[in-house]
Amino acid sequence: MSDNIKKVILCKYGEVALKGANRRTFESAMLKDIARRARRYGDFDIYTAQSTVYIEPKEGAVVDLEGLKNSVSRVFGISAYCEAAVCEKNIDAIRHTAAAYLPPLLRGVATFRAEAKRADKTFPIKSPELAAEVGGVVLSSVPGIKVNLDNPDITVRVEIRERGAYIHAGQTRGAGGMPIGTGGRAMLLLSGGIDSPVAGFMMMRRGVTVDAVHFESFPYTGEQAKEKVLTLARILCGWCNTMKVRIISVTRIQEELRAKCDESYFTLLLRRFMMRLAERAAREAGAGALITGESLGQVASQTMDALVVTDDATSMPVFRPCIGMDKEDIIKISREIDAFETSILPYEDCCTIFTPQHPKTRPTLERVLEQEARVDVDALLEEAWATRQLITVSEDF
Ligand code: ATP
Ligand code: MG
């Protein structure tokens, strides 16, 4: 019987609802993201009303609503979503649909509250009575369940909207943030570690379109290290669809630094080269900022003095969303986005090669520039830049 119920997905806006004159821009980016995902799961009508996105299967369409719900959980800009049953706007249809749709959802739930809302005020039954009706249906069809108005386990809602009556129970937290594509474009320095994928994710959640650049030291780093980075990029595509990854070899730079500079400066000097190459990659991609996974004090190259020296090598803004986070907090997000298991695979990274025994933790720019003057910066940059490969990755299906 429940198979005949028409089911839809409702998505509530997050911050987008607070936007003023430019709200349309944000709404349409969010709808575009949803429409792109929906195409994989069937034929849907998608529209907005009252800070809610409605995703409704077209008449007679065969759809995979569970699959789409799972994909919608990754749409930035949505604060919560739920499935709802839709029926005609009359009390018999509402009772009948509630009795068929709600019991399986409420099985094992101890307490509930029923709420009703009439966006369509022509509906003849007032909200408190309607809530009582639906509450009555639940009490008589779900064994053992009790009403708790103050602190229920689940809230059952019936909403009378223009197109029909919507009945739903409970909602799931959405991805939050701002719709993808509304926050400009930035270049993520993507290593194979834990922090940089998290940093990329955090900026994406603010609507930024993220490109990535990865530095390899072939043959010191192998094919598996590169594959790992591409896998991480693919994981991030779960939120952004596709990502352009540039891969640049810094092998010659590392060899030159090792031959000509003091060991304690290796990491910092390499990081300055990375910033310059990332800036070039950003300009080529039309990106206006860099993103790194640095966290203050995490390692020698991430002390405040070291970051000052690193930043001096680029004129672009550098976003470091992990800067004030503990490793534990970063790992929590890494697990939530399913990147952690990949990030901890044990392949060599270019930074783990030629790692100094005693890196400088309080470097001065003056000393670093003296060291840097021992190599031909421009020639090394040209040589590294010429090695770049561009790979476009997308979500696996
Ligand atoms: P992660 O976990 O992201 O690797 P980390 O704690 O290991 O970070 P570092 O190795 O010092 O820190 O790197 C700091 C940041 O520099 C990284 O978060 C990343 O943004 C960038 N980075 C480091 N190595 C590379 C690389 N091989 N390619 C691209 N970016 C890199
Ligand atoms: Mg690293």
Image (cartoon, rainbow, N blue to C red):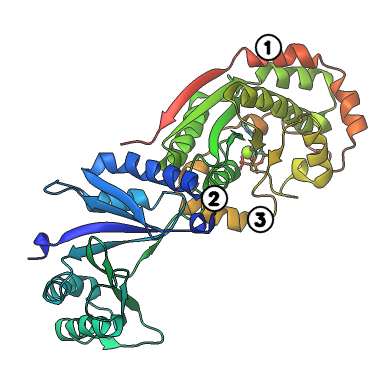
Cβ atoms at labels 3 and 1 below 8 Å apart: no
| Residue drawn at (24%, 43%) of the image | 41
Alpha-carbon distance for marks 3 and 2?
34 Å
Q: Counting residues from the N terminus, which is met first, the one under dot 3 or under dot 1?
A: 3
Q: Quadrant of the N terminus?
A: bottom left
173 w.r.t. 187: above or below: below
Q: Is residue 120 left or right of residue 57?
A: right
Q: Nearer the viewer, mark 1 or mark 2?
A: 2
Front position in the image: 85 or 141: 85
Number of other residues with Cα within 10 Å of mark 3, as a class: few under 14, some 14 to 19, many 20 or more: some
Q: Is residue 257 above or below residue 331?
A: above
- Whole-percent x and y of residue 36? 34, 39
Find disc 1 in the rendering and name its residue: 383
Relative side of 127 to 234, left or right? left
Label placed on residue 325? 3
277 lies above or below 140: above
User: Of the residues under marks 3 and 2, which one precedes in the sequence?
Assistant: 2
Instruction: Give the image location of residue 27, x and y in percent.
Output: 44, 48
358 or 14: which is nearer to us?
Answer: 14
Mark 1 vs mark 2, CA separation in Å = 48 Å
Q: Residue furthest left?
A: 1
Amino acid type for the residue under numbered disc 1: Glu
| Ligand 1 lies under 8 Å from the Cβ of mark 3 | no
Closer to the chain start, of discs 1 and 2, is 2
